[in-house]
Each structure stands twice: as structure tokens, then as C-alpha cells.
Image: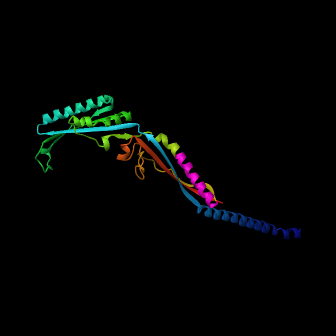
């Protein structure tokens, strides 16, 4: 009985020693994994995937502005109405329907009532109107835009706010293109990462971070996008708006871990 009692104190010591040993093993494994993770975090490659699509505009906006000036308001207004009728007749001859036309409000300027007018001489009244065409038949509008000289020959000075021809061509199908383009851009980025890894004797691991990029729309025959950091559903500048054919572009940036 005395011998058994004297041996019992060694059991807790053995258990304690085993626990300490197990703790050292587990701690060493965890520390080793953390060091490995730190080294892995330092080894990654940043690649970009570019995708471009050529698309056709699906709508056109054509504002045609005209103005008349004179000292007799009634006469100036009559001339402006004649101009409006001539513009509407021109549109009808090009196959543009009334449902595609919006006639804006008449704007009248009386120079004598303008306190900031430093040149009171000349005509007193200026009457301006704008007739705007909204159409999904972009080819018809483009063809009509080539015949605006007929209005000039009729004595109507026309103007527009969208650059050459005054016609703005828009593309509204960007959202439908986004999923496939993002997938393709990511796939292209992965292909670039695989080539880099092969050259460096590594393998591509998981994604460290990713940025799908910003979609941009430019004229199809232009060398660049509509602008850095710009996204739009119908073009971002005058050059893009003046072109029926457009280039949709996105660049995805992805960081991949590299492993041995």
C-alpha cells in the first residue's frame, strides 16, 4: 500500500509533460503554417484581362434648332413658324413620323429688356425653336442627316448640340453585355497569370483580389475609350455620340497568388 501511494504522484507529472509536449508540437505546426501563409501572401501577380465588343447604336436623338430675328415680333414669330413647318416637312420627306418628333417651346428674347446688353443696336427680337427627333431607326436618321443641306438651301439656319450633323447615337444594351464580358475578361486575366507562372516556375493559386473594371463606350473607329473611369450606357463624349458603331470596352484587374 505504501509503495502504490508513493508511485501515484508521478502520474500527474507524466500527464503534464505529455500536455506540454503536445502543446509544443501544435504550436510549432501553427507557427509554421503562419510563416508559410506570410510567404505566400508576398508572392502574387497582378494581371489584366481586356475585352472589347463592337456594337451598333439602337437609338438616335436629333435636335434641330432654328432662330429668326427682327424688330417686329409678329413678323419674327411668323418666320419662325414657317421655319418649323419647313423642318417638319423635311422630316416627313425622310420617312420620320410624327410619333418620333417633339416640338419644343418657343424661346423669345427681347434685347431691350436685357439690362446686361451692352449693344442695344441691331435687331430687337430673337425667336428660337427646337424640333427634336427620337428614333430607334438609326440608319434612317443617319441618311436624313446627310440631307440637311436642303434646309440650308431653303434659308433655314439649323444647329444641333451633338457635334457633326447634330445627331447623337446611343447604345442602351450595355447591361445585357456585362455578364459575358466580365466572364471573358476574368478568363483572359487568368490566361495571362498562367503564362507568367509558367515562365517563373510557379503555379497560379487562388484569387487575392479582383476588380471587374469600368465599362466604357467609344466610337468604333477611335483609338481609345470614352474616358478614364467613365461608364455609360450611351456613350461618354461627342465622338462616341456621333458614331453609329461603337466599341464597348472593359479591363478586369486580378491578383493571383503564386505557389510552388
Please give left or right for residue 13 compared with residue 89 in the image.
right
Please tell me in which quadrant of the rendered image residue 11 appears. bottom right
Residue at the (85%, 71%) spot, across then down = 6
> Is residue 200 highlighted in magenta?
yes
Number of numbered callouts drawn:
0
Residue 38 in the image, given as x and y percentages of width and height: 61, 63
Note whether residue 162 is visible: no
Please give left or right for residue 105 compared with residue 25 in the image.
left
Note whether residue 97 is visible: yes
Question: Which segment did they paint magenta?
Answer: 182-201
Q: Quadrant of the N terminus?
A: bottom right
Magenta portion: prevailing SS class: helix
Whether residue 78 is situated above or below residue 248 in the rendered picture: above
> Is residue 217 highlighted in magenta?
no
Residue 239 in the image, given as x and y percentages of width and height: 36, 46
Residue at the (11%, 39%) spot, across then down = 71
Please give left or right for residue 34 compared with residue 102 in the image.
right
Please give left or right for residue 124 compared with residue 65 in the image.
left
Residue at the (57%, 54%) spot, across then down = 192
Q: Quadrant of the C terminus?
A: bottom right
Whether residue 207 is situated above or below residue 111 in the rendered picture: below
Residue 188 in the image, given as x and y percentages of width and height: 55, 50
Whether residue 206 is situated above or below residue 247 in the rendered picture: below
Please tell me in which quadrant of the rendered image residue 29 appears. bottom right
Residue 145 in the image, given as x and y percentages of width and height: 32, 37
The scheme the figure's colours follow is rainbow
Please tell me in which quadrant of the rendered image residue 111 appears. top left
Amino acid at each position: 500500500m505504501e509503495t502504490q501511494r508513493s508511485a501515484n504522484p508521478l502520474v500527474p507529472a507524466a500527464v503534464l509533460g505529455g500536455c506540454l509536449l503536445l502543446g509544443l508540437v501544435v504550436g510549432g505546426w501553427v507557427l509554421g503554417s503562419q510563416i508559410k501563409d506570410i510567404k505566400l501572401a508576398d508572392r502574387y501577380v497582378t494581371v489584366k484581362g481586356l475585352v472589347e465588343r463592337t456594337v451598333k447604336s439602337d437609338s438616335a436623338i436629333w435636335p434641330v434648332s432654328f432662330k429668326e430675328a427682327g424688330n417686329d415680333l409678329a413678323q419674327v414669330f411668323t418666320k419662325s413658324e414657317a421655319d418649323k413647318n419647313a423642318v417638319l416637312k423635311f422630316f416627313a420627306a425622310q420617312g420620320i413620323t410624327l410619333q418620333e418628333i417633339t416640338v419644343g417651346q418657343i424661346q423669345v428674347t427681347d434685347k431691350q429688356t436685357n439690362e446686361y446688353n451692352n449693344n442695344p443696336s441691331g435687331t430687337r427680337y430673337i425667336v428660337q425653336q427646337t424640333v427634336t427627333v427620337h428614333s430607334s431607326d438609326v440608319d434612317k436618321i443617319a441618311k436624313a442627316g446627310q440631307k440637311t443641306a436642303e434646309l440650308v438651301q431653303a434659308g433655314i439656319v439649323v444647329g444641333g448640340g451633338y457635334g457633326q450633323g447634330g445627331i447623337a447615337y446611343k447604345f442602351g444594351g450595355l447591361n445585357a453585355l456585362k455578364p459575358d464580358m466580365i466572364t471573358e475578361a476574368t478568363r483572359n486575366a487568368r490566361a495571362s497569370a498562367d503564362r507568367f507562372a509558367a515562365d517563373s516556375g510557379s503555379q497560379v493559386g487562388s484569387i487575392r483580389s479582383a476588380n471587374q473594371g469600368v465599362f466604357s463606350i467609344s466610337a468604333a473607329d477611335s483609338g481609345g475609350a470614352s474616358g478614364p473611369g467613365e461608364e455609360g450606357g450611351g456613350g461618354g463624349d461627342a465622338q462616341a455620340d456621333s458614331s453609329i458603331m461603337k466599341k464597348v470596352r472593359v479591363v478586369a484587374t486580378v491578383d493571383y497568388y503564386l505557389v510552388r
